[in-house]
Amino acid sequence: MKLHLNARASQRGLTLVELMVGLTLGLLVTAALLTVFANASNTGRNLERASQQIETGRYVAELLSEDLRLAGFYGEVQFTGAVYSQPDPCSTTPNPTGALNWVADPLTLPAPVRGYRHADTVTCLANRRAGTDAIAMRRVSAETITPASIATPNTQNYVQYSYCVSDPAMTRLVFGADPSAFVLHNRNCTAANSVRAYVSRIYFVASCNQCGTGGDTIPTLKRMELVGNQVVETPLAEGVEMLRIEYGFDLNNDGAPDTYLLTTDASVTGAAWENVVAIKMHYVTRSIEKASGTGLATAQSFTLGGAGTYEIPTADGYTRRAYTTVIRLANSSGQREVQ
């Protein structure tokens, strides 16, 4: 019994050395756990960042494809013998001055698309990011309304086409905002034909999402759209940093692109804006926040098809991804295929 009591007494308490060793081991274990947690957290944020970039890239491809493939949809307007013009994409002046280039005689229509290279000036594109292209597209709405349903006063421009053989041959088209001007008739020649709203948009990359005093520096894909008698800016996708465009020109009128160029070329027969039937969009997305960890954000170089390269000479902390999507202009190419 005496020996047993002595053993229990010898186990009471810790020496100072034992306490310090225990604390040190505990700190090491805690530090290791914190490191593992921090690495896991950084990995999670980087995965989320990469997923966001991929989602942005896919969204931009879908957005541009859905809208640009409808360029040149002019409803019932007949294209035969039409002359194509290049209106100022920033113009808000309606006919009869012809600033938006819809004329009945001779039949004059705005070209479905018009590209602007990074060196070209477009006056209404505020905060456009240096080195980026822009593209203007034009069409009419897929929905029709009756002239009588247009509220007055009205600033939205509409297009009306004649289905009546009794209408004057020189007035097969009416364009404007005045409801009383839409006097062309339907097939029965008994009532005014329906009208379609005019759609004019410009896609470009801005150097900021929320611009102006107190704004940010997030590069953003934006759209400038003619709404009534003013041009309205709409942010579409944050993190789009670069946009370069190639245009597929149909040189033999068969509906298929024969050559891709960065802009029109007078030395190439048929390389005019009205003959664009396809578009190659090259764009680069950038992470909104800087990456966590080493080796993720480095100097980068992206080949943008025939539109050159995009260089990031030094690491700036952001990750980037490059995308290319080809868009067929269904209306411009389709009407040629059936001829």
Image (cartoon, rainbow, N blue to C red):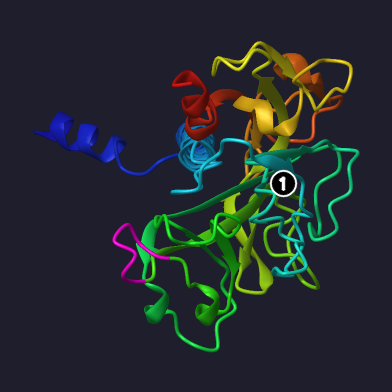
Residue at 70% x, 52% y: name it.
Answer: 218
For residue 17, say whether it is visible.
no
Is residue 331 something that shows in the picture? yes
Picture coordinates of residue 229 (x, y %)? 67, 74
Determine the secondary structure under disc 1.
strand
Q: How many numbered discs, if any? A: 1
Percent position of residue 276, x then y: 65, 27
Q: Amino acid type of disc 1? A: Val
Residues shaded magenta = 185-191
The residue that mark 1 highlights is 205
Rendered residue at 66%/56% (across/down): 102
Q: Relative to the observer, which residue lies in front, 44 or 169?
A: 169
Residue 275 screen position, x and y as percent: 67, 27
Residue 312, compared with residue 201, is above or below; it is: above
Q: Is residue 168 left or right of residue 119?
A: left
Asked whether 179 or 163 is in front, the reply is 163
The residue lying at 88 percent from left, 23 percent from top is 266
